[in-house]
Image: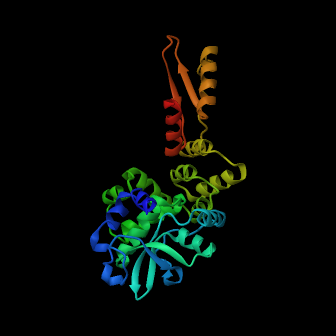
Amino acid sequence: MSDTHGKKKALGRGLSALLDNPETDVQTREINTDYLSGSVAQLRIEQIELNPFQPRTRINKSELSALALSIQQQGIIQPITVRKLGHEKYQLIAGERRLKAAKLSDYTMIPAFIRIANDEQMLEMALVENIQREDLNPLEIAISFQRLIEECKIRQEELSQKVSKDRTTISNYIRLLKLPSEIQVALRDDLITMGHARALINVENEKDQLLILQKILSRKLSVRQVEEMVRVIQSGNKPAKKSTKSILPEKFELAKASLNAKLNSKVEVKVNRNGVGSITILFDSDDDFNRILSKLES
């Protein structure tokens, strides 16, 4: 079971703290097996019902098939987590994709951690597990954060510690829920990115938001293009004045082109007559920033 223990260490701090708490473990005599408290039990899949608090709203079929194939070849490396409902009856807390993939692979048994949890604990554990471990889209993450705050009565400061994300990041996700439903659906269906959505949040008029959304979809606008459209709207529909800066000397233009190619990102270079200037590297998101940083450090 070395793989199991290795995987458990990778859990987020919030969920790990819950799962490592002896008070949430089923005692050996309670489940009437030879498994020690905190160890992995082999359960029949037919004994397990799905979690009604599962925050994931969609599961990609191709990804599920790929996971099923991996399970057929490698087995189930990471156990699911369930709570005991009654005699030989369990409810899923975390691991819906693994459970469904196991069913696709014609498994009848699955390794599981067995816990005791009330409904509020169930919801918190499932939400924290998914935020930390699953590839939810931004809207699903936003909904998960909102549910943790509203239904589990968790303050943003405490939530920040549980999911290892700063409060600004959490606030940015929750703000997505203020967008019109059409934009939320586009974000959910991966038709636009979180960068697009965050730019649209800054547009006060809903009609303008939806108009920009249609242009994003029809013209496949980049995040930077949308941000420029938003700036035009915020300035009273007055296009920004064209820059009157002088043309860069050739060596700076060459350096700018080289940086653009190396970083795969837009780079701006400014220099005055005295040779004093600046280099600005633009990025779309936290992930894009980290990508650029890794290239600069390499």
Name the outermost residue toward the top.
274
Q: Quadrant of residue 240?
A: top right
Give the left or right position of residue 95, taking residue 8 as reference: right
Image height of 38 relative to 191, above or below: below
Rendered image coloring scheme: rainbow
Q: Position of residue 73 (x, y in %)?
A: 61, 63
Residue at horizontal 52 percent and vertical 15 percent from the top = 272
Residue at horizontal 71 percent and vertical 49 percent from the top = 219
Q: Position of residue 85 (x, y in %)?
A: 40, 85
Name the outermost residue toward the right.
218
Most foreground residue, 192 or 84: 84
Residue at horizontal 58 percent and vertical 50 percent from the top = 196
| Image mark count | 0
Most foreground residue, 159 or 113: 113
Q: Position of residue 63 (x, y in %)?
A: 63, 62
Image height of 6 relative to 114, above or below: above
Name the outermost residue toward the front.
34
**Is residue 249 visible from the viewing direction of this image?**
no
Name the outermost residue toward the bottom.
87
**Is residue 131 visible from the viewing direction of this image?**
yes
Q: Position of residue 149 (x, y in %)?
A: 37, 66
Image height of 96 relative to 63, above or below: below
Q: Which image quadrant: the N terminus?
A: bottom left
Residue at horizontal 49 percent and vertical 10 percent from the top = 274
Q: Quadrant of residue 191?
A: bottom right
